[in-house]
Image (spheres, rainbow, N blue to C red):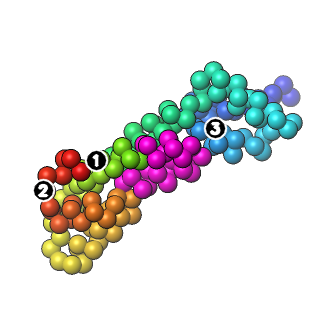
Amino acid sequence: MGFEKPSLKGRALRLLAQREHSRAELQRKLAAHEEAPGELAQALDDLQAKGFIDEQRVIESVVHRRAARLGASRVRQELQAKGLPPEAVALAVSELRGSEVERAREVWRKKFGQAPADAAQRAKQMRFLAARGFGGEAIRRVVAGADGDLESA
């Protein structure tokens, strides 16, 4: 039976090879494989000390992957679910808010491409953007086609 079970560190590295994970995510995913109390914490401490676990890289990865398609509130939910520090999440989300209208306009353009013909279509377009996590003001501006000076907003 020469099959050897992977170590906690090995399992963590395999997960990290797929994508960036926060320490809290690794803790949650690997807890069932811990055989001795404190073993998982020690393995994660080692990986963090060597730079394999980096919360800032996790935030940058999520923002990079998701910001083009999702609004700031959905990105915030995803970052919070990963157990990241609230201050770092707040900072990343505040940076996203600056481009909210432009990102919402691009998502809207790809999905619909034309102004709503009636109230039902308008409501559908607004619900779509809201489900993607865009804020109410950005949604109203995009669906109404109000292309005023938004670059500074």
Range drawn in magenta: 71-92
Q: Which residue is mark 3?
A: 23
Label 2 sits on a secondary structure element that is loop
- Please state which amino acid type lies under the numbered disc 2: Gly
Q: Which residue is mark 1?
A: 99
Separation (CA) of disc 1 from disc 3:
29 Å
**12 inside magenta stretch:** no
**Mark 2 in CB contact with mark 3 (< 8 angstroms):** no
The reply to whether residue 106 is visible in this rendering is no
| Mark number displayed over residue 72 | none
Q: Amino acid at mark 1?
A: Ser
Coordinates of residue 106 in the picture (x, y in percent): 24, 51
In the picture provided, is 101 more to the left or to the right than 59? left
Q: Which residue is mark 2?
A: 148
Q: Residue at x 39, y 39 (%)?
A: 64
Determine crowd level at label 2: few under 14, some 14-19, many 20+ residues with C-alpha closer than 10 A.
Answer: few
Relative to 14, does residue 141 appear above or below in the rendering? below
Percent coordinates x, y for residue 112 in the rendering = 22, 61
> Would you say 22 lies left or right of 145 here?
right
Q: Residue furthest left?
A: 148
